[in-house]
Amino acid sequence: MPRTRPLLVAALLLPLTAHAQTTPQPSIATNSPDGKPLSTRVVAYNIDAKLDTDKKTLDAIETLTYKNLTGHPLTSIPFHLYLNAFRPRSTFTKETHFTGGVLDPEDDKNYPSEKLGSITISHIEADGYGDLTSAMHFIAPDDNNAEDHTVTEITLPHPLAPNDAITFRFAFHDVFPLSVARNGYKRDFIMGGQWYPKPGVFWHGAWNCHQYHSSTEFFSDFATFRVSLTLPRRYVVGASGVPIGEVTNSDNTKTLSFYGEDIGDFAWAASPNFTITDGTYLSSLGPVKIHVLALAAHPKAGARYLNVMQKTLAQYDHRYGPYPYKIITVIDPEPDSEMGGMEYPTLFTGETSWYDPTYLTEQAAEHEFGHQYWYGMVATNEFEDAWLDEGINSYTEVKVMAAIFGQNTSVFGRSYANIGDTDLRRYDYFIEPDFDPVTRWAFKFRNFYSYGVITYGKSATLLTTLEGIIGRDTMDEALRTYFMRYRFTHPTTEDFLRTIEEVAIADGKAISTVPPPPTHGQHSTISDQSTATSFNEADASPALVFPSSPPLTSTGYPDYATTPATNSSLRSFFNQAVYGTQILDYSVDQVSSDPAQWWLPEPKDKKQVQYLSSVYLHRKGDFVLPVTAEIVFDDGTRLRERWDGLDRWTKFTYTRNAKILSVEIDPDHTILLDKDLFNNSYVTTPNNIPARKLSNIWLSFQQLLAQLSTWIV
Amino acid sequence: MPERSNIFLHGFFLTLRCFPALIWAYIFNLGLALIFSIRLHAQFSSIMDHSLAAQRLTSGFDLSTLANTFLRLQDGPSGGNAGAFTSVPLYLLVYFFLVPGTLFCYQTKSPAHLSTLFHQGLLHFWRFFRITLLTILVSALILGPLVFIQGKWADQVDKHAVELHAFFATLVGYVIIFLVASILRLYFDLVEVYTVQLGLHLRHNGKPDRRVRRALAPAWRTLRAHFSQAWPVFLFLTILGASAVVLTARASMHMLAQPRVWPTFLLAQFGLFVLLFTRFWQRAAETSLALQNPTFTPSPLPILPVVGKVNPIDPLHPNHPVPAHQISLPGQPFDPIPNPEPASPSLDEPDPGVFHHNPAKSPQ
């Protein structure tokens, strides 16, 4: 790795120090209503980088001013060096080997040289602290892996006092790998993500600077970025923030400058094959430029991205709040790279192909744009609360996709077949539903697969179910309140849940309640506790009453120690769906309609017969949730019954001059957390067309397979 | 020399002549699939027949419902659809019996009764089993390196081309592999045909010739000599069958949302039947080719038909003109028996085929 001489470094850094600042300035990259900063800008970056597109390397000088707003004197500052993840013995590689991940498994045993990536800091100094190069040492706060070099810590010779600022100057060298995960290169496309030294976040009284993991994303403070990138002229570049300058150099290169503010990260993408498609969306805060850089190999992608972005921006603006930035850049990455579908502030990578008859191209764009809200602005910790960005974003994704492309057709909608995004996410969840709660730290899931289906699938499904419980308007209002309240901050799971409770209570969709204090050593079972539900059920409408069911400990008793204080009737749902791994499964167990006077001969006029009808409902899962059942009689009568679900089963009986035609649990189809929707209903007259359709497909498939197999004879 | 005919058309007529063989193959294909779908159908029924959620598959085709159905099949200790593919190896086994019988009927013009098919299948089973092993071995040796090269080619393409261009560039490799595979298949088809043909001849020990290796060379000679005729026919019929399946599958797919199952069923079955028909047609065309290029050359002293051949000047034969010198003059009555009677044809040597009594020679 090249080492820069100190004098040369000083000469290079000198002009940059003038730009390093943390003081507010009029908005350049945002539509801030009053021109003031939207966030607490903790860091100011000034990076001057030169990209070698042949070697896929980058040399840069970074000036970083960190303002100590922690209220504590700081003696050390950790930095992310995430390009070092792409090494054979890194934690990232180890995790992908054992638990799966985005790394290509075939590369496990023999790490290919072209997939090696690295970031090397050749020099560090700080104003008033001198040369800190030797004060830098790698740490591994998550797993103590000494071979992992994705986090480095700089010990300061003397503490940084609260409200003081420190200006670092780094000289670093990047080697981009052939794309492994989220960044790197593929052919002549280069993605600069997590490519510069970035400090951790001082959060909840301590540094939060996790290593790079196979399944986790990122967490950082809000900042300003002024980045200059020098590269060959034939390249087209998309980057976070807004472009602020372009200088053509004599050596057939050009220097592009970008400025971003109130963002937590900076990424760029460069390719000579980009075609530009631009559009504008007029948001409630001002015009937003939609800047699409699509590959020439995807001639339809530009228009598709632009179309879905305009509709998505409108949906988000209307539902959750305004998009305050002046630009959103859509990058269409090289095919077969591992860089598609990744979010960065004001920039994201989509995912498409030359032939895509579905709406998956639009889904990817919508999802990644949603991260501008859930990660970009509501900057949750993606390591520890992944569900707050991926989960909430998956929920808003299914809502927005349904609004744009239809509830049951938002992924594929043809006259002969269809599938909606909501169902797709729900299906994901039930592939592996009960190993991890959504609140588990992202890199502590059972495996990468469980992380995916729970964080995306279950989160979207549980929030859709919650929407069914408290109503769509209340849910939208809760999300909007959450966004407006916590944008440009780092909220937690409880911040989110309490916001929902607050809005639901205000809308009369939930009731505030105070639980009995937990009695330690009380050996009550879950059902005992459910029976002893303390709040006054008479005060609440039946639809809002939930039995209390906190998560269980390993010994099978309610785990009050980790259960947050109950403060609404929704808390039981949260405890099971958010903090717990309970499976929800209700079924119609038995339906019958027999003559009440069964010993008498059946009269000719069937309407004169009085039937004794009975319905048995069964709670098969360990998730307790009040449910509604609709019973339809053959005289047209529809009855709705409410069951609290506390016991394992319940029975409804009717004596009427009509037989039961059908029984359906959750007739409004709001409880999507139910594992098996087929057993939620029972119709007395069977319809075998669905079974025959599937059997016919299976039959034909078997025949074809059998015929093809005979070609060896 | 045998009469030359168009193998495409001759093969078609051979297929029709032995149509029962095709019908039996289709019946086994459908029947076995039906039998081994019963359990799965029962599972589908138990999940969906009484469920309102399944109605999304009645007048529509919601893919999530389909996916959830398969997810539900995994529930319970006896879940899953293991065994649902059992029909495939069983059909393959049946096919081992049907193919030799069909080729036998093609070559001997015997009626394609099921008993004949299975009898010949039993007689030829181990021969065809050996041919199949050889086919797999040779295909692995030839196609394996090609697949490896294709992988390298795809990697090379991936470095320089993307999407549609890359697709077509990679497709070229797959097409080459397909063409080579088709030649291999054609050759081993001919080996099978010649194997059956060899089995029709008795060896010196009086037993049928069961040596597969003796069919390899004739098959190779025939393929080499008639490659330009046989390969296009084979390819055309392969593509015809595949096209039928693709088209009917596509049409069936577009009927999925209908609240009826039988149109989809019939269409899919039609496509599968055409696929089977074209395969039998291929076999028949190859048989036609082999009949025109038999393993055994005809005897140098052929036994010719008596009528019209032995004595071309037979005056009794109405089809032959009377010699000019025998035509009676006007006014003279026609004598059918000339006078004097012509001498009997004599041979230079005694005819070995005629028994001659030699009193001097003692009986053996």
Image (spheres, coloured by chain):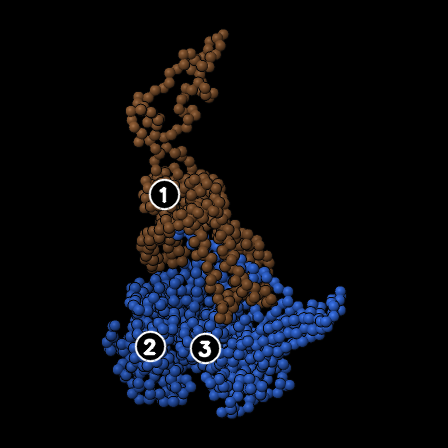
Q: Which residue occupies the foreground of this view, B108 or A406? A: B108
The local crowd at label 2, few if under 14, some if 14 to 19, many if 20 or more residues have their Cα within 10 Å, is many
Quote the CA–CA distance across marks 2 and 3.
26 Å
- Quarter occupied by residue A297: bottom left
Q: Chain of mark 2?
A: A
Look at the image and tell me whether residue B60 can be seen.
no
Q: Dot 3: what SS?
A: loop
**In the picture, which chain is brown?**
B
Residue, disc 1: B208
Quote the CA–CA distance across marks 1 and 2.
76 Å
Q: Dot 1: what SS?
A: loop
Left or right, A375 with respect to A144, comes to right
In the image, residue B260 sits, relative to residue B211, either above or below, namely below
For the residues carrying marks 2 and 3, which lies nearer the camera in this image? 3
Q: Chain of mark 1?
A: B
Residue, disc 3: A436
Q: Position of residue A525 (x, y in %)?
A: 53, 86
Q: Position of residue A137 (x, y in %)?
A: 29, 81
Q: Chain of mark 3?
A: A
Q: Which residue occupies the foreground of this view, A86 or A28? A: A86
Q: Dot 2: what SS?
A: loop
For the residues carrying marks 1 and 2, which lies nearer the camera in this image? 1
Task: Tell me the quadrant of the picture where the N terminus of chain B can be found.
Answer: top left
- Quarter occupied by residue A593: bottom right
Residue in view at x 49 percent, y 55 percent: B32
- Quarter occupied by residue B233: top left
Q: Mark 2 or mark 3, which has the lower sequence index?
A: 2
Task: Tell me the quadrant of the picture where the C terminus of chain B can be found.
Answer: top left
Residue, disc 2: A150
Q: Position of residue B2 (x, y in %)?
A: 39, 34
**In the picture, which chain is blue?**
A
Three-letter code, disc 3: Asp
